[in-house]
Amino acid sequence: MLISPEGRILSSDLALPRRLGVVPADFLGADIYSFFDPESAALRRKAAAMVLCSGEPLCYCDESRPGRIYDTRIIPVYGPERRIDALTIFVRDITSEERAERERHKLAAAIEQAAEAVIIADPNFNIEYVNQAFEDMTGYSRKEVFGRDLESFYTGRLQEEQFKLCAKLLAKGEVCADRFHLVSKTGEVCVCDQSVSSVRAKYGVNLGYVFVWRDATQVSKLEEQLRRAQKMEAIGALASGIAHDFNNILGPIILHAELCLSRMHERPPLESSLPEILEAAKRAKALAGQLLHLGRDRGKDTPIPFRLSTLIKECVTLLKPGLSPDIRVKLQLDSRSDLILADPDHVHQVIMNLATNAADAMREAGGDLTFAISEETVGETNWSRHSGLPAGKYIRLTVSDTGHGMSPTCLERIFEPFFSTKARTGGVGLGLSVVQNIVARLRGALDVESEPGKGTSFHIFFPMSDVPEAVAPQPRHTMPLPRNTARILFVDDDEATAVSLTAALTGLGYAVECRVTAVEALRAFLRRPEGFDLAMLDLFMPHMNGLALAKELMYVRPDLPVVLFSAYTDRVSSEEMRQCGIKAFLSKPFDMATLDKTIRQACGQDAYEGP
């Protein structure tokens, strides 16, 4: 728009009269100030007067119209003799732009004052922006970190791998949310929760990444305290269940041992009772091994092919003495080939847990406890209930009872840890959780059917083994043990263990010098270092552990073979023992054949393989 110094409209485009609601023909030649209210007109006259007086262009934001903002520019037009003949006025509506700018400023202020650290990085993870919380959390200023690779804040191998994994997720367009340990400029370590997402423009172009870090150190401490409290609660509940299982195992040991003592003059009862004692002791050892590996990788499982029916008969033999007289055990073992590949101790645990639950359900009224085996072929479409099972052949074990049954509500929770319906008998609710875990590890399936008053049936599906059945070894105690002449320095701080193992070593023919402390053993060794062919040391003893004692002994006699033994198998790594020159490690408890074989191997003799 072009106006005269007095305000008369000389020319204009069509936008301004349309905005003011005036016909263009009536607009030209009119007084521009007449189209505004007195207050707005006075402001515009004042702006024009400033340009006429100074002769310089003027720019300002016109907000005289409520809710609208206009960028207004007034430029003088000079005529002859440098006289201002007219004023050119440019008006542009910048309401949306101004609002967007204000929102950006508000957002920037909010990010700057946020309690969480906010980092904006380019596509190569180089830092472009950090807020004040970042400076407070890390101790680094903006100038120090601008352009720095963000990966440098992830120190340590685990943190670096975590960052690389996060980068892979971001490359796929996913959001990364995890926790890592942030090391500040002063070396302090804090637990940091982070959330990372991509910043993308039109058509998915990646502009960079935004990292949000939150100090979670206190939260992490509270979570750790909660985990410890829950762990202690779980251990307390687990201890009750352990005691129950061990009592079941110790019962046959005690009864058969007393039977042997009362009939020492009768050989046949000894021959029938001693194998039962050894078998029960092996079960106790297997249970202890499972407790030691609770919650860890089950890589030490030893699956072998065996007949499920044989193991069921063995379990029934152990169960019958403790069952109520009103409970009848029925076997329906009609499978032609019931070979499965698994760890027998774990399957034994599955059967005993299910049978114990079934017996408890029939404790008052009695009933039938049935073990049934059948073959099942799972195809692509013929097994809807267990669609998760791969196609193939399975051995189906059904353990059913005619007890009181379970309600649908109870069925939904029976596999939850610590859920139990045995309030009267003190059940801890771990048995079925263990069963489910074992069956899942065997790549099988577990199903349950039950109705109140009609009993319960558990169906377990084991993959059928295509490996030939393992030949069971003959009992080693029926053969005479070999005689030996090695001289052994034996050390164990537990006197009962020291007495029994000394007797076992003596029975194997070894010359044994036993000590119950590492200090006594070291003194005995230093008096005559050449008087021993091997040292057997308990790994964990007060004042000086077995590994430290072994180093002292081998410092005097580098050629001395040393064997460590302990009930704890995970406290010292095999690599550490190998570097120290340890010849072998025995996990307690062990039998005499294993003991003799290990000693012979450590001394460089032929290993005793047994009959």
Image (cartoon, rainbow, N blue to C red):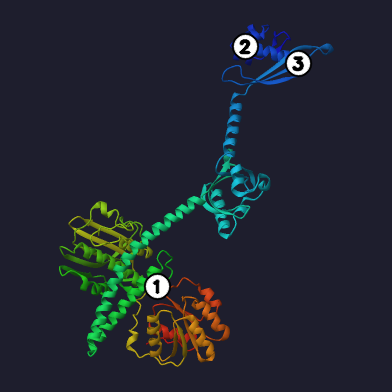
Residues at marks 2 and 3, CA–CA distance in whole angstroms: 23 Å
Q: Disc 3 marks which residue?
A: 76
Residues at marks 3 and 1, CA–CA distance in whole angstroms: 97 Å
Kindly indicate the quadrant of the structure image that contains residue 76.
Answer: top right
Image position of 188 (left or right of 591) = right
Amino acid type, callout 3: Pro
- Residue 459 vertical position relative to residue 343 in the rendered view, above or below: above
What element does badge 2 sit on?
Answer: helix
Question: Which residue is depicted at the point 34% across and 77% down?
Answer: 282
- The mark lying in front, picked from 1 and 2, is 2
- Residue 128 vertical position relative to residue 74 in the rendered view, above or below: below
Q: Which of the labelled discs sits on residue 246, or is there none?
A: none
Amino acid type, callout 2: Glu
Nearest to the observer: residue 543 or residue 91 = 543
- Mark sitting earlier along the chain (2/3): 2
Nearest to the observer: residue 281 or residue 470 = 281
Task: Count neighbours of disc 2 (C-alpha within 10 A) and say few if under 14, some if 14 to 19, many if 20 or more.
Answer: few
Q: Which of the labelled discs sits on residue 302, or is there none?
A: 1
Number of marks in the rendered image: 3
Image position of 94 (left or right of 88) = left
Q: Disc 2 marks which residue?
A: 39
What element does badge 1 sit on?
Answer: loop
Residue 371 percent coordinates (x, y): 23, 68
